Image (cartoon, rainbow, N blue to C red):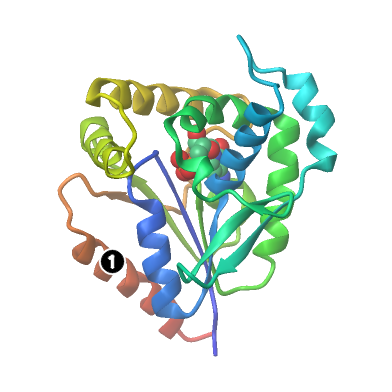
Amino acid sequence: MKKISIAIDGHSSTGKSTLARQLAKSLGYVYIDSGAMYRAVALYAMENGLIGETLDEAGLVGHLQALELGFKLNPETGRSEIQLNGENVEKQIRTIEVSRYVSEVAAIPEVREKLVRLQQAMGAEKGVVMDGRDIGTVVLPGAELKLFMTAAPETRAARRYKELLDRGESVTFEEVLRNVRHRDHLDSTRATSPLTRADDAIRLDNSDMGLKEQYERVRSLADRILNAKK
Ligand code: DC
């Protein structure tokens, strides 16, 4: 049966991973959360004293070779979860602390080089849904379906705020909104692979779109490609 690759890029907290998971599940594809890999590198830097007043870039680059990243199915959650040097760090990478530093870590060319290589290897076979910032432009430029997701910063901050509160973190809405705007800025202005829409990516603004409507719309786009001749 014909299989395709699906690349989902866009701003933070636009629900990329929710959509990517739904698609992967319904199509029987593998879901790869590329952001989790950048978060794991940021966590590593935090845990190894490489983030103080500033990020020790050269120090982190020196550690990169020894850093092992991958995904492994967690039977308890039924999800494939990020592993850093053999340890499941899925929970630790979702804190506001990691969110604060991850854009800086993701701006380091050597970090991107290493992660892009790993992601391309994971996506070498069709039948993957990968989400991130540069999937349609750099990692899987040949993906048959590319989406670029966006939503108003306030909408995104409200979603993220709720998630963090549910997880028991103590943050204010303003702090989260500031973080969303800050990350947008860093993600779109960095020199290496800035967040941009691939020319052939479909723009999806979900500020006023329910999850079901969004899923159905994208699933029908995928079906159209899957059912096309050749
Ligand atoms: O999607 P996320 O919020 O988990 O991503 C975390 C950070 O990693 C975010 O600041 C952008 C960066 N990132 C990236 O630069 N390239 C990717 N392919 C995925 C994420």
Residue that numbered label 1 is attached to: 215
Q: From this viewpoint, is residue 217 visible?
A: yes
Q: Name the residue at 41% across, 55% down.
A: 17
Q: Amino acid at mark 1?
A: Tyr
Query: Judging from the image, what secondary structure is the residue with disc 1 in?
Result: helix
- Residue occupying the point 19% across, 64% down: 213
Image coords of residue 228 (percent x, y):
44, 82
Q: Quadrant of residue 95?
A: top left
CB at mark 1 closer than 8 A to ligand 1?
no
The front one of 137 and 164 is: 164
x and y percent of residue 61 in the render? 79, 29
| 173 horizontally vs 26: left or right | left
At 21% from the left and 31% from the top, the residue drawn is 154
Considering the image in quadrants, where does the N terminus appear?
bottom right
Closer to the camera in the image, 158 or 95? 95
Q: Residue furthest top?
A: 53
